[in-house]
Image (tube, rainbow, N blue to C red):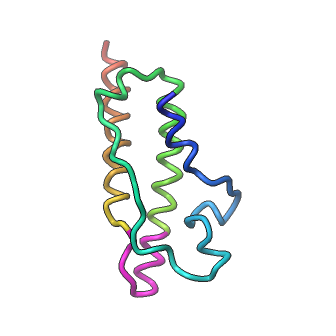
Amino acid sequence: SDCLRCLQSSAVAFGFEEFFPPGVLEKREFAPESVETGRRWRAGELRAKSNEDLHKLWYVLLKERNMLLTLRHEAKRQGVPLPSPTRLHKVQKSMAAIKAVIGERVRF
């Protein structure tokens, strides 16, 4: 399904490593300045998804959001610019769209 496109880009990590992009902790260097990312999920696309797919996507986005917030905090601590700052906005917009779609389903 389309939901797999976001799952396949997530690296498998457990514990503290989940809060940093892959390779950052091992190389002891900060994340690359620019990271290629896709666009946000739109409500129209999400309406076609099952509740199970929305649930999975929510947790993928939640994990990504937490990682990006950690990265933002670390960038601020080190006094360096946040790599690809639009990523967090896209994740937040996608999560808001999921909430809107779930809200529509509950009302009807």
Residue 56, quarter of picture: top right
Percent x, y for residue 47?
35, 23
Which residue is most to the top?
108
Quarter holding the C terminus? top left
So how many labels did they put on this image?
Answer: 0
Picture quadrant where residue 7 is located = top right
- Where residue 69 sits in the image (x, y, percent)? 44, 64
Residue toward you, 92 or 80: 80
Q: Is residue 16 above or below residue 26?
A: above
Magenta residues, start to end: 71-83
Reply above or below: 40 against 35.
above
Q: Is residue 46 magenta?
A: no
Q: Residue furthest front?
A: 36
Residue 29 % position (x, y): 56, 82
Extreme residue toward the bottom, this view: 79
Camera-side residue: 31 or 59? 31
Q: Looking at the picture, does residue 49 appear above or below residue 23?
A: above
Tell me which secondary structure the magenta stretch mostly adopts. helix
In the picture, measured across the screen, residue 58 lies left or right of residue 25, that is left
Q: Nearer the viewer, residue 96 or 81?
A: 81
The residue located at (49%, 37%) in the rendering is: 57
Q: Residue at x 30, y 22 (%)?
A: 104
Asked whether, in this view, residue 25 is left or right of residue 103, the answer is right
Asked if residue 80 lies in the magenta stretch, the reply is yes
The percent position of residue 35, horizontal first and vertical second, equals 42, 64
From this view, report whether residue 63 is shown above or below residue 79. above
Point 51% across, 61% down: residue? 67
Q: Is residue 100 left or right of residue 78?
A: left
